[in-house]
Image (cartoon, coloured by chain):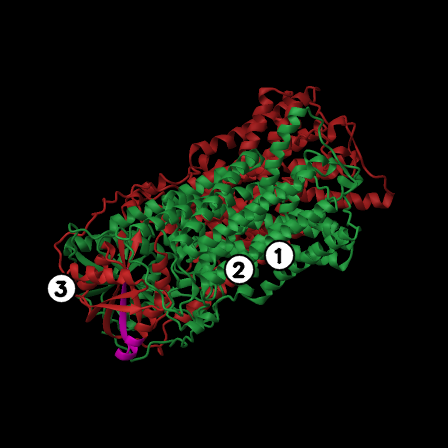
Chain colours: A green, B red
Amino acid sequence: MIGDPLPTEKLEGQLLPKKLALPIFASDPLSSVAYAPQELVMILLVGGLAFLSFAPWVAVAVVVLLVTVVASYRQLIRAYPSGGGDYEVAHRNLGEKAGLVVASALLVDYVMTVVVSVASGVDNIISAIPELAPWRVELAVAFVVILAAINLRGVSESSKAFAVPTYLFIGSVFVMIVVGLTRTAFGDAPVAESAGYEVHAESLTQAAVVLLLLLLLLRSFASGCSALTGVEAISNGVPAFRVPKIRNAQLTLVAMGGIAITLFAGLTAMALISDVHYAEVPCDLIGWAGCETEPQRSLMAQVAAATFGDDTVFFYLIQATTALVLLLAANTAFNGFPLLGSVLARDGYAPKSLSTRGDRLIYSNGVLILALAASVILVVFQANLTVLIQLYIIGVFVSFTLGQTGMVRHWLRELARMRHPAGSRKPAPRRPPADASPDDRPLTRGAMQRALVINAIGAAMTAVVLSVVTVTKFTHGAWIVFVLMPILFLLMLGVNRYYRDVEKEIEVDPVTTFGAQGDHAIVLVGRMQKPTLKALDYAIAARHDSLEAVHVSIDEAQTKQLKKDWVKQNIHVKLRILSSPYRDLSHPLIAYLKQHRAEHGSEVVTVYMPQYIVGHWWENILHNHKARRIRQKLMLVHGVTVALVPWLLDSSDLIYGRRSRPLPGQDRRGEPVRPVRPVPRREVREPGGARKP
Amino acid sequence: MIGDPLPTEKLEGQLLPKKLALPIFASDPLSSVAYAPQELVMILLVGGLAFLSFAPWVAVAVVVLLVTVVASYRQLIRAYPSGGGDYEVAHRNLGEKAGLVVASALLVDYVMTVVVSVASGVDNIISAIPELAPWRVELAVAFVVILAAINLRGVSESSKAFAVPTYLFIGSVFVMIVVGLTRTAFGDAPVAESAGYEVHAESLTQAAVVLLLLLLLLRSFASGCSALTGVEAISNGVPAFRVPKIRNAQLTLVAMGGIAITLFAGLTAMALISDVHYAEVPCDLIGWAGCETEPQRSLMAQVAAATFGDDTVFFYLIQATTALVLLLAANTAFNGFPLLGSVLARDGYAPKSLSTRGDRLIYSNGVLILALAASVILVVFQANLTVLIQLYIIGVFVSFTLGQTGMVRHWLRELARMRHPAGSRKPAPRRPPADASPDDRPLTRGAMQRALVINAIGAAMTAVVLSVVTVTKFTHGAWIVFVLMPILFLLMLGVNRYYRDVEKEIEVDPVTTFGAQGDHAIVLVGRMQKPTLKALDYAIAARHDSLEAVHVSIDEAQTKQLKKDWVKQNIHVKLRILSSPYRDLSHPLIAYLKQHRAEHGSEVVTVYMPQYIVGHWWENILHNHKARRIRQKLMLVHGVTVALVPWLLDSSDLIYGRRSRPLPGQDRRGEPVRPVRPVPRREVREPGGARKP
């Protein structure tokens, strides 16, 4: 995938060591600890305080699922180390449609990662500084704008600055859990500020309670599953790891899984111990006077305040690192989005331009679209975390399920191939040299069977969760995802079919024959200016069979001046004047060209036009429009080819000396930043003496 | 200005007879009658009911001003019949800076015309259907969107459908005034619904009252001056009139002025007779119970209801035609905006592309910008007419004052020239033939002196009003205009300076010499496809001194396939393969071109590239990006010219058969809609046999 013929040691320097890869890829999955326990507890409390006793069991179910998914992705990394992730697995093993479903799920996912992470980050900031509560939505949108600006400016994720907050977050939350548990062990269990509040629950009949219990357990589990979001990140970033890539990625994945489980379990435990009561509707908390005016503090903030005390340094540290790591998680989406775009473009499901590495404009557009979509969703849902999480989990579990199902198919196929190596197109695995890296060792039959079982369990469990999530969340906003995904799906399919049709259209066939004859050239002349002279000079140098200069007259005075200048400059090329009754440049030209072709048969006519090359983007607004319009119309005329003769304006000097900036997703792709080449200063004017015919 | 060599009788058919020109140009100035009396009365009432007795005097002052301005513009039309209006007059007589001040004032004006007209239109609709009151802003924005959509779609203003509402409006308001006055004469004066309400006024000392009186009189006068907005419209549209253009335009202007004065005076009189009390803050009306919940009905609606009775057909007719004519007035801004843009572009103060008649894209952008700006202002100021009018009048009077001052300078110069004909560059006026149209008759010395006096009075009065408006409205929102205008001014000046610098840069000078030698050609080959074969075919036909095909290898398999195809297609042109270590297309190419030039001296290298021509705008997203990027980079290489060989995709068939739609401003400019030319269906494939060297 990288395919760079650079010496390995040089490339190595650009790749990520495990200790940097962990924080970069783990900020997304680990940050979900900031909201998953809270949502889990909150949904249970809808049924009343008694339901809280089920929380440990729901948490255990989430942890079991997390272990399964991590184990599943360990296998996926082994089998598909190219960084395509779930999309690639589903596409290759389950076919195009399944791949596109995953792709559309992932696109929605990236937007929701930004939205949920930012919303949760703002929630935790408000928990520390309640005075900011009235500006919740404004703060959230501001953070999205800041992230977009940073990514438009260009930032390398692999800088150590990105690693610090993640480690700080892990460390401080871990310390908090240890302190909390220690205090509990010594009989001084922390007590949350909301511990004293009763929770309003409707009185129900016995039968309704059982039904409600079931539904709430499932909903709570579904919400708790938001802890799994982002686990797939490492599988998309394998190329960015140092060799042995697969082994290092797997180790990082397992480490990340271990940390996530510790934090999730620890935080849920501390929430239960300190008796945090968190309600979807704040005023359902009976006994809280300020429910209408004050913001409800996040579970993380309540645990931190209970453990370390309000207004302590530790409390603020926990809140600050939580907010920071959530913003980092949002940032990962800005990196992942263009990466997915380029993979889709490579496969022909997105505009090919998205696969052009290094086109800042395209990445800028991606960043802007992502930021705009995220801002709109934040405003529409008023940065309400609980509602947003409903939208988030669907996409995540669609890609989980299809990815794991694809892996099952993959292993079944591999095992079948091993049994019947004759039928296989691949040669039997060679024995690697003794000093091969662990990555190169072929899998044994037993390992494949183990992987098959792991992925099958993963697929089954995520499929169950997906149905649970769909059923319990559909009316809570998840239907929006089910509207968006098919639209994206159809768009991508349409793009692919379009490219296929064009491909067919331009395919070489034995019927179409070419055989242009003749060689006439025309130089378009407006006023006597240097760019025109240069175009004329080039046309003369190309020694066409016949050459003439053509001027379309839309202003009598200008035409007269040109004729005068023509004589003055001693140009021997014939100047033909076309009159334009409608003050239009292209129609008389097209009429002339058609007439010329009618007289001279299938002659190729080369039309020379000067083209300004400018330095600033805004200069394009001021140049070349007339020329572009004429060019577009001329190109419709049969037998015409347009020769653009560049004229570099002084301002174009500026385009040199621009430093290349890192592109979003560059680090996760393991690509080196292309070195800045010293470009020689342009020679401003043509050398050589005047040569007028 | 038109400069069309069409036979006159043919062009005449496209031009506007007076009876059509009047409604088209007068919808803007006449519609201001819908809000001017209301604002005049409202401001006076701030001081209490007693102040209302000054209303007739303020109205008389406004009428006197209106007469002066109409007389002034009569002279302007005579002297500058090209349609440039105030901008042209100020630019030619007072210099560039004054012209640009007018231009920036006019740009702000067009936006405010849309905003104020739509806001007043919605106000009158709500007066008829109070249930719509909660959706005031939404309605206003919706109308802006509808107007933009209509103008994006293309609509000819000269259709009779545009004339009907204006005449209906004039007729129905006139009937209302006559009926009202007749009833008053017979002792049955209409009584407005708000006649019974007292007006809340603060109790003040004697001295303060005198000061307040002065200030309120001035403010009321300034608000009443909104009756003058749009008077300049005819002076911008002279080219659209039938010959004798000047005479017809002048007659229409005077007719328009007469109607405006009648309606303004009549409506103000009726408002005073029927005792309409209209307050800036509705609850200042003492005795009105519903001031918090019900919308305050517009003065027009109150007079109509008092005269004809509530819920009568006539009442609804008045409200409907008022709203319609206001929307028409808003529409005129959508026509004037691109027209001003093209005049500014012609003079080099706006991107030249704006002067490209017939480029729908550019007009679309103009329509969108105007609609967006208007919508933002409507939302920010909550479609509050009173506040918006403050912003409106400033711009109007800036251009009035500078335009009239320019006219004074113009006449002084003309008179000086008449006294010293020797110093004049113009020949003495020839005696016209006896049957000359009135337009061609030269002005006598006496006529010029009369015109000078008229314009001098106009300039002085508008200057006084401008200072009154500025002083009384500055803190009421007019400061925004004073921020926006300098920004626009500097932008236009910057564009002009930029164009001037570039002009200087590309000017032919005796030092620069051209003398390219040699003629090498390269055909860029990606995969073996028909567009590539066509490009190759054209390159062969041009018989360059040397020709080679170049392929940049970024994919081993693709390169191998190409080599195979090259042999299979029996192409005798040498295929050169460049390796690309960074999977980048342009860098190896540029390196190769530089090396080639280093070896062969100042040889011109023509690079042939296929270019896809597509039918739908969205197809551009899917094509040509890689080619464009390479082209942009190649054009920076010295001695390179890029030859684009078009390949028309099947979908490009669609671009034919599109009908030309009228452009905004086409009618006022007096330009005919260009006839649709029958374009022959394109010949799909090149004729002639295969000719491979």
- Quadrant of the rendering where the C terminus of chain A is positioned: bottom left
Q: Earlier in the sequence, mark 1 or mark 2?
A: 2
Residue type of the residue flagged with mark 2: Thr
Q: Position of residue B387 (x, y in %)?
A: 67, 43
Q: Do the residues bearing badges 3 and 1 touch, measured as CB atoms within 8 Å?
A: no
Residue type of the residue flagged with mark 3: Pro
Q: Which residue is mark 3?
A: B693
Q: Is residue A534 left or right of residue B304?
A: left
Q: Is residue A378 left or right of residue B553?
A: right
Q: Position of residue B397 (x, y in %)?
A: 61, 49
Quarter assignment of residue B588: bottom left
* Residue segment shown in magenta: B595-609
Q: Residues within 10 Å of mark 2 (few under 14, many from 20)?
A: many
User: At numbered mark 3, what does the secondary structure look like: helix, strand or loop?
Assistant: loop
Residue type of the residue flagged with mark 1: Val
**Do the residues marked 2 and 3 share a common chain?**
no
Q: Which residue is mark 1?
A: A325
The residue shown at (33%, 40%) is: B659
**Against A45, is B306 above or below?**
above
**Do the residues marked 1 and 2 share a common chain?**
yes
Would you say residue A620 sits in the magenta stretch?
A: no
| Distance between the alpha carbons at the discs numbered 2 and 3 | 60 Å
User: At numbered mark 1, what does the secondary structure look like: helix, strand or loop?
Assistant: helix
Q: Which residue is mark 2?
A: A252
| Distance between the alpha carbons at the discs numbered 3 and 1 | 65 Å
- Mark 2, chain letter? A
